[in-house]
Every structure is written in C-alpha cells, then in structure tokens.
Amino acid sequence: MRVVVTGGTGGLGMAVVETFLARGADVHLPIVEAELPAHLPWRGNAKVHAARVSLEDEAQVSAFYAALPDLWASIHLVGGFAMAPIAETTLAAFEQQWRINSVTCFLACREAVKAIRRSGKAGRIVNVSARPVLHAAKSMTAYTASKAAVAAITQSVAAEVLDERILVNAILPSIIDTPANRKAMPTADYASWPTPAQLADTIAFLASEANALTTGTLVPVYGRA
C-alpha cells in the first residue's frame, strides 16, 4: 500500500505516518524541509520516502504525484491557523490562510485523483477541515473560510469520483493535544483534547479498504473538546 501524507512532520503528521507504517504502508512525504527533522521517531525507516515540495506550487505538486506508482491513498494534513477579529483581518492574512489550507488541499486532491486513476484501482483521500466549519467561533473568519473550502472540495470531489471507487472524506478536529498547543494554552484542559494517535486511527480507517462505504463525509473528531 502506497500512501502520501502531506504535513507529515507536524504534530498530527508524526502520528499518522507512524500509524500507516504500522500497517505496512510505504509512506511518501512532500516536505518543506531540506531533509527530515532529526526528532522524528521513524526517520531512517526504509518505507518513508521524503521529497522537498512546496504544496502551494502547482508545478511541484503535479511533479511529485506524477512520479508515484500505484497510489492507494493521499492524506492531506498540511495547513495553518490564524485568528483575529474581522475588523483586524487584512486581505494578506485572509489570502495566506486560503493558500495554506484551501490551495494545498485542492492541488493535492487533484493530483491524487490523477495518480489513483493511473493505478486503475480504487483509492482513498482524507482531508482535514476544522470544527469551526460546523460550530462557528469568534475571530476566526479567515481560518474558517479556508477550512470551509476544504469541506466543500471534499464533498465535491467525493461525488465526482465515486463511480471510480475513490472515497473522499474529511475529519474536523478541534484543538489537538500537541506540545505546541499545550505551550500556547498552558491553562487549558488538555484531557478533553483529542490526541494525534486518536485522530490517526480515524484517518487510517477512512483510508483503508475496511472503509467500503463512507465518502463525502465531514467527520467530527473532537469528542469532549
């Protein structure tokens, strides 16, 4: 099983890559770094293949996916977060959220569909939207709009490729229990936050052959958060 994971070096990505490796997958990582960071526990694993790719660059994304044989699944975790009251949100800030969240998802989905089609088999795509898409939060207009686009891309692509047995879904997390988030919110109730490992299990199911029916779905993954 060959899987792409964007954002694989982040807090959630580390767990997702580990989960797919445990299931025997070959994992391909488009990364912004020159090489895999030293702290990654699976760095050096022969089944991990990293390449430097800007996921906002159409030509680079196309070339990355074009080089992949027999792609089964593509998991799109890369993204960013910013918040500010609407009156203080600049167009540049809005466009930055659009590019890091919406554009990267669009390009990865498009090229993943092409790569899966080349295999002549079924496939899976999993995106990451966000809880505020369903439950509005204050001072998150730019972020929420960009993640709403991810949700719309997910459902539209799912309808388009259903007959090709390509299932497309998105998870909607809240705050994830990562070291960076704990540092940013030191007084928060960490026990209520979903962990990267928990989210990775949901993603792995959606991307598996065991998921034979679920597509076009926005999956809440925030529990008590």
Image (spheres, grey):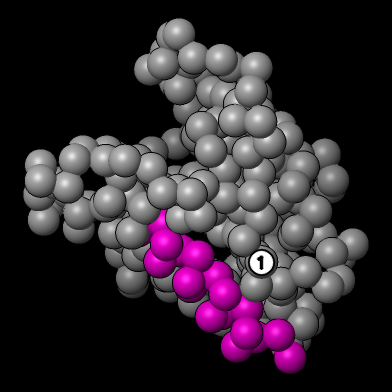
Q: Nearer the viewer, residue 9 or 173?
A: 173
Q: Determine which quarter of the picture holds residue 104.
A: bottom left
Which residue lies under the disc numbered 1? 217
The residue that appears at 84% across and 64% down in the rendered structure is 211
Q: Residue furthest bottom?
A: 163
In the image, residue 200 above or below residue 41: below
* Magenta-drawn segment: 146-163
* Residue 176 in view (yes/no): yes
**Residue 180 position within the rendered picture, expressed as x and y whole percent measured from the top left:** 44, 21
In the rendered structure, does residue 11 fall within the stretch colored magenta?
Answer: no
Can residue 8 be seen here? The reply is no
* Residue 25 percent coordinates (x, y): 78, 51
- Which part of the image, by quadrant, shows the C terminus? top right
Identify the residue at horizontal 80%, vertical 53% (top origin): 205
Quarter of the image that includes the N terminus: bottom right
What type is the residue that disc 1 sits on? Thr
Q: Is residue 118 depicted above or below 25 in this figure?
A: below
Q: Is residue 109 left or right of residue 83?
A: right
Q: Position of residue 3 (x, y in %)?
A: 68, 58
Q: Residue at x 86, y 71 (%)?
A: 212
The residue drawn where x is 71% and y is 72% is 215
